[in-house]
């Protein structure tokens, strides 16, 4: 667990810096004062924690300070972490055991640039490392680059991929991939869908078609429908997620590119608004940088709380 917390701290370095650099007094050994609370408030807004969460953190720190005028930075940081843990209770998504009769299908959804294709490959690799049989379906047939990108990752990580040519019927690729995964006894089929704007109705219909075709094989497929969102977009990703949720019934989220942004607080806003579990977060470029989301490690990392 120590190693994972360390990885979270490294992955959220810019978010921690956005808070810590402005609140040296708060994270130091000096008593809390009005100035440090003001800088904390500014830092939390900058990191995209939102109005509700920021208010709750400040109110609890102020209440603790009224009881103890010698309240120090690390104690205040622990209070902030505890608020995040409470707000995010239930946010951790965990994959259940796969069914024995058919591959469990995970449909990866999102707009271009969210890291969806890369995340699909990293997820396949992680499941493979856990001893699972995995097939990847290259259903982003709209872009030749997406198919090639998935193939490159497949070669690098020795992943099994079912793909076709650019412009092919993505639902047909999904159909073939399901048959291949079933015939080979795979545990999971990960479907990388076309990156799309949530406002494009024809592309949203393509998602629905993939779902209908998969359900000809298995009425419950795709069992998981995960939206991949770019963490650097901050709270702007919430409206995007709402539309996808209304159209496709999301069952989970993957938040990427958190290592390159100071807006790591957006995770809280997304969960507060949608109450959709967060399965994984992206903390770097390497395959192993896709990590299962941990509320405890996230809260401690953001506030610099030590074990």
Image: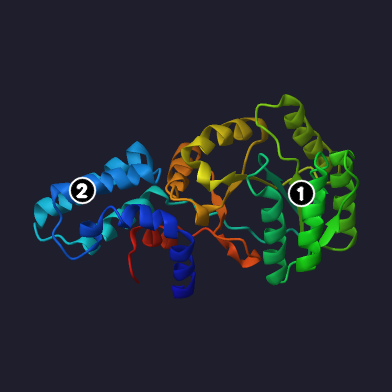
Q: Quadrant of residue 41?
A: top left
Q: Are there few (<14), some (14-19), or many (20+) residues within 10 Å of tag 1?
A: many
Residue 265 place in picture, x, y as percent:
42, 48
Q: Nearer the viewer, residue 6 or 66?
A: 6
Q: In this rendering, does residue 45 appear at all?
A: yes
Classify 75 as above or below 109: below
Q: What numbered label is drawn on residue 4?
A: none
Q: What numbered label is drawn on residue 37?
A: 2
Q: Is residue 203 left or right of residue 198?
A: right
Residue at 33% x, 53% y: name it: 19
Residue 152 place in picture, x, y as percent:
79, 60
Residue at 22% x, 49% y: name it: 60
Q: Quadrant of residue 200?
A: top right
N-term-proximal mark, 2 vs 1:
2
Badge count: 2
Q: Quadrant of residue 85?
A: bottom left
Residue at 22% x, 57% y: name it: 26
**Residue sticking out furthest to the front:** 21
Classify 231 as above or below 297: above
Q: Which residue is mark 1?
A: 191
Residue 165 place in picture, x, y as percent:
91, 45
Measure the C-alpha gap from mark 2 to mark 1.
46 Å
- At mark 1, the secondary structure is strand
Q: In this rendering, does residue 82 appear at all?
A: no
- Do tag 2 and tag 1 residues touch (Cβ < 8 Å)? no
Residue at 26% x, 56% y: name it: 79
Q: Are there few (<14), some (14-19), or many (20+) residues within 10 Å of tag 2?
A: some
Q: Is residue 181 left or right of residue 4?
A: right
Q: Nearer the viewer, residue 299 or 223?
A: 299
């Amino acid at each position: 667990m120590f190693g994972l917390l360390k990885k979270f701290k490294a992955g959220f370095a810019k978010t921690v810096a956005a808070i810590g650099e402005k609140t040296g007094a708060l994270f130091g050994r000096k008593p809390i004062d009005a100035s440090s609370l003001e800088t904390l408030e500014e830092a939390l807004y900058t990191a995209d924690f939102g109005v509700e969460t920021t208010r709750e953190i400040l109110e609890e720190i102020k209440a603790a300070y009224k009881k103890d005028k010698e309240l120090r930075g690390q104690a205040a940081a622990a209070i902030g972490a505890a608020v995040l843990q409470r707000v995010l209770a239930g946010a951790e998504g965990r994959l259940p055991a796969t069914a024995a009769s058919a591959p469990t299908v995970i449909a990866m959804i999102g707009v271009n640039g969210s890291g969806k294709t890369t995340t699909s490959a990293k997820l396949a690799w992680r499941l493979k490392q856990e001893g699972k049989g995995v097939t990847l379906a290259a259903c982003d047939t709209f872009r030749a680059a997406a198919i090639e990108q998935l193939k490159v990752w497949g070669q690098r990580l020795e992943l099994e991929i079912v793909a076709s040519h650019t412009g092919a019927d993505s639902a047909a690729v999904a159909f073939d991939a399901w048959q291949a995964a079933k015939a080979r006894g795979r545990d999971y089929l990960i479907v990388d869908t076309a990156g799309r704007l949530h406002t494009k109705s024809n592309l949203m219909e393509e998602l629905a078609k993939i779902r209908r075709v998969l359900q000809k094989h298995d009425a419950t497929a795709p069992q998981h429908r995960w939206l991949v969102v770019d963490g650097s977009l901050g709270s702007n990703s919430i409206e995007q997620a709402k539309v996808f949720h209304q159209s496709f019934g999301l069952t989970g989220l993957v938040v990427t590119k958190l290592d390159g942004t100071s807006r790591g607080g957006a995770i809280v806003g997304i969960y507060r608004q949608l109450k959709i579990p967060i399965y994984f977060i992206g903390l770097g470029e390497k395959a192993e940088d896709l990590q299962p989301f941990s509320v405890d490690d996230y809260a401690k990392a953001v506030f610099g709380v030590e074990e």
